[in-house]
Image (cartoon, grey):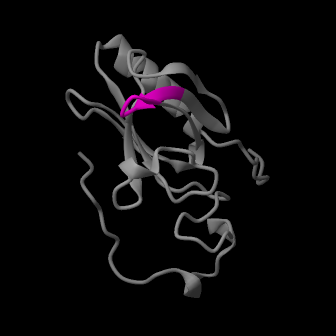
Amino acid sequence: MSDMTIAMTSSRPYLVRALNEWILDNDCTPYIVVDAGIQGVQVPTEHVANGQIVLNISPGAVRGLVIGNGALEFSARFGGVPMQVFIPLQAVMAIYAKENGEGMVFGSEPGSPDPEGGGEPRSSRRAEDRPNGRPTLKVVK
């Protein structure tokens, strides 16, 4: 075994695609939770609450869903108004089935921009720059 570290691409796009397929195969409705504050996110801002938006990405709710390696995009109607939605995959915080809550919540990946701001990748931040105290969790419905 080598001591060399191999840099790998983000696993998030692969997991989002797989979980979306799994949820649909089980006749459930896939929902994603999106951090609307991440640069490049294009969602209907009137539906953003607490910096997040929950979107139904089922085939009956969206058209032209593409889950690429860098972004998730589709067109949908919000309040009867058509919109093209664009979401960098680092902004996808979770994907789950509406019917039973089964799915996955994503954490931060090394090398990804810090969602708290600052623009520096997490792995390059010094220990003294990191927040202290207990982490907090939030239930997403």
Residue 2 x %, y %? 78, 48
The quarter holding residue 30 reads top left
Residue 21 within the magenta-colored segment of the rendering: no
Residue at far left of view: 100
Q: Is residue 106 left or right of residue 79?
A: right
Residue at far bottom of view: 128
Residue 77 within the magenta-colored segment of the rendering: yes
Image label count: 0
**Vertical placement of residue 45 versus 97, above or below:** below
Prevailing secondary structure class for the magenta stretch in the rendered image: strand
The C terminus lies in quadrant = top left
Foreground residue among 108 and 98:
98
The quarter holding residue 21 reads top left
The N terminus lies in quadrant = top right
Q: Residue at x 43, y 28 (%)?
A: 77
Q: Residue at x 71, y 43 (%)?
A: 8
Q: Residue at x 50, y 32 (%)?
A: 16
Residue 25 x %, y %? 36, 11
Q: Which residues are magenta?
A: 75-81
Residue 100 x %, y %? 20, 30
Q: Residue at x 64, y 57 (%)?
A: 112
Foreground residue among 116 and 108:
116
Q: Is residue 140 left or right of residue 130?
A: left
The quarter holding residue 33 reads top left
**Vertical placement of residue 132 versus 73, above or below:** below
